[in-house]
Amino acid sequence: MSGDPVSDGEDGSVLDLSDDDGDDGVVATQAPDHRRPSNTGDTVRFVLRGIGQTLITGGLIILLFVVYEVYVTNIFAHQRQVRVHNALEKKWASGQDPLALPGGNQSAIPIGSGIANIYIPRFGRDFAFTVVQGTDDVSLEKGPGHYNDTALPGETGNFAIAGHRVGKGEPFLNLDHLKAGDDVIIETRAKWYVYVVEGDPRTGNLSVRDANNVPGREIVNPSDGQVLLAVPDNPGRTPSSHDRYLTMTTCHPKFTATQRMVLHAQLDPSLTAARSGTTMPSSISALYNKAGV
């Protein structure tokens, strides 16, 4: 006698329980189900368990994303920075200067290529980045980027650069640690330029403004392009020969991009030094002693 297939009650698979030899014709039957019927409490616990598992999974995904953005992107950015730095050093060693100062033609500088090195003594002797041409996403993942059409190092006007604050190399991670009177060193193939952060150097107060009403630091909206003008925050004003600014921008607050932190500095011509070889001149290296590092 052939038996009917019967579900095992667990995973929906079918078991053939018929007697194979056909002698006694006995067919096994399914045991009665003694499980307790589900109630409202079981349903609530099931739903809460599902929500909890979803939240844990979501939290792990967010954690992995943060790890990637903060740490993994730094590894990739460091590799790109090394390549762009080495390429710039090779150009300098062979006599090439991408800036062609004075009066360099920016349109001839390839986007994403190195143009200068930046050092900030306040951040320690190991802080050094090669500045690249351009502020598009690809360029900024190589290092701090020079805003196209702003002045070049040492020129009259505003030499403006942007840099990531968290992840992707984070060259401007500690930009908020700068104080009025701090030095920012820019190395080109021909010269070393020193810019001094605006404000009151006696107190370190960055809110004090210079003769052009330019402060040492300001927080602005991402759409506020006036900070990049030839004379920052002064629309329509033509810079005089002594108006030689450096402007650095980065995201604010950390881990967000809702605003921009902007630092302004002025060139100190008395500290400009000719570049010869790869050794930092004593007048420039002395600035690290001034910063206490």
Image (spheres, rainbow, N blue to C red):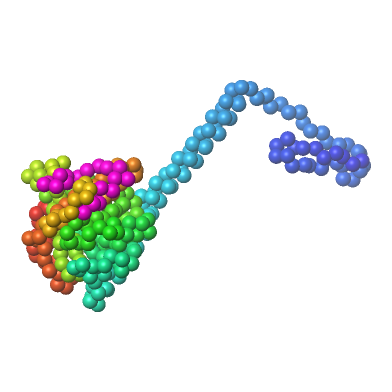
Looking at the image, the residue that sits furthest to the front is: 236
Given residues 249 and 108, the one toward you in this image is 108
Given residues 74 and 99, the one toward you in this image is 99
Q: Quadrant of residue 93?
A: bottom left
Magenta stretch bounds = 210-232
Residue 133 sits above or below residue 34 on the image: below
Residue 226, magenta (yes or no): yes
Does the rendering let one see residue 124? no
Number of callouts in the render? 0
Question: What residue do we see at 23% from left, 76% from top?
Answer: 95
Q: Quadrant of residue 98?
A: bottom left
Q: Taking 159 as reference, is 255 left or right? A: right
Image coordinates of residue 16 in percent, x first then y, are 81, 42
Quadrant where the image shows the C terminus: bottom left
Decide whether the magenta segment is chiefly helix, strand or loop.
Answer: loop
Quadrant where the image shows the N terminus: top right
Q: Taking 48 as reference, is 26 left or right? A: right
Q: Taking 2 as reference, is 52 left or right? A: left
Q: Taking 37 as reference, is 19 left or right? A: right
Given residues 101 and 70, the one toward you in this image is 101
Image coordinates of residue 86 in percent, x first then y, are 29, 69
Residue 26, magenta (yes or no): no
Image coordinates of residue 209 in percent, x first then y, are 13, 44
Given residues 182 and 193, the one toward you in this image is 193
